[in-house]
Amino acid sequence: MVDSEGVLRITHESFADFLIDEAACPSRFCIRLEDEEHRLTLACLRTMKTGLRFNICNLESSYLLNTEVVDMEKRIEQNIPSHLRYASFYWANHLSACRFDDVVLELLQDLMEKQFLFWLEVMSVTKRMNVVAHMLSLLIAWMEVRFVCDQFDK
């Protein structure tokens, strides 16, 4: 189906199933989910590395609650681009389906050591604090599985 903007949209679920089935789909079209999750994880972590910063919404005071900032939605739109919001909201979901990689590990370490509070600020101003604990539990589970597998390989 072609939508009003001239973009081809495939809406039947069986087509997506076909694209990820290595036995049915020709290799040049086949999508390996693990590879794509790895790419998305790297993209999210790199986006946050370059985009997160202190006081991202340029608030004049840290004494006000987010709900007390009159133009908070406008500030979010102006200062947190959609790709940075996506990266901040979904990096852990992609990570949980991602294979271990030294580059991923290095970017995660950078996020946790240098930008953790900046990420929390984005989650806070966008009213997503309710998912932070779950995201961190996904990170911990990913690290535990990778650590156990690493120990097995030795």
Image (cartoon, helix red, strand yellow):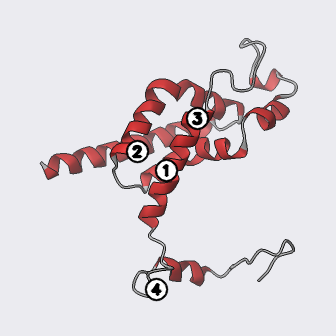
The numbered disc on residue 41 is 1
**Position of residue 82 measured from the top left corner of the image (x, y, whole percent):** 71, 45
Dot in front, 2 or 3? 3
Percent across and percent down for residue 116 are 52, 28
Which of the two discs, 2 and 3, labels the residue nearer the N terminus?
3
Mark with earlier residue (3, 4): 4
The reply to whether dot 2 and dot 1 touch (C-beta < 8 Å) is yes
Q: Name the residue rendered at 61%, 38% in the picture.
A: 130
CA–CA distance in space, label 4 to label 1 = 26 Å
Position of residue 102 relative to residue 29, above or below, is above
First in sequence: mark 2 or mark 1? Answer: 1
Q: Is residue 100 left or right of residue 25?
A: left
Q: Work out whether mark 4 precedes mark 2 in sequence or the reverse, and give the earlier one.
A: 4
The disc placed on residue 26 is 4
Dot in front, 1 or 3: 3
User: Which residue is disc 3 drawn over?
Assistant: 50
Kind of residue indicated by mark 1: Thr
Query: Counting other residues with Cα less than 10 Å from the Cα at mark 4, is it few (<14), some (14-19), or many (20 or more)?
Result: few
Instruction: Identify residue type, mark 3.
Output: Thr
Mark pair 2, 3: CA separation: 15 Å
Nearest the eye: 89 or 106: 106
The alpha-carbon separation of the residues under discs 3 and 4 comes to 37 Å
Q: Categorize mark 3 by other alpha carbons within 10 Å: few (<14), some (14-19), many (20+).
A: few
Do callouts 2 and 3 mark residues in contact (Cβ within 8 Å)?
no
Q: Nearer the viewer, residue 54 or 6?
A: 6
Closer to the camera, 53 or 98? 53
Task: Please rate how many residues cluster around mark 2, counting C-alpha atoms within 10 Å: few if below 14, some from 14 to 19, many from 20.
Answer: many
Give the residue type that dot 2 points to.
Val
- Separation of disc 4 and disc 2 at Cα? 29 Å
Give, as a three-letter code, the residue at label 4: Pro
Q: What element carries label 4?
A: loop
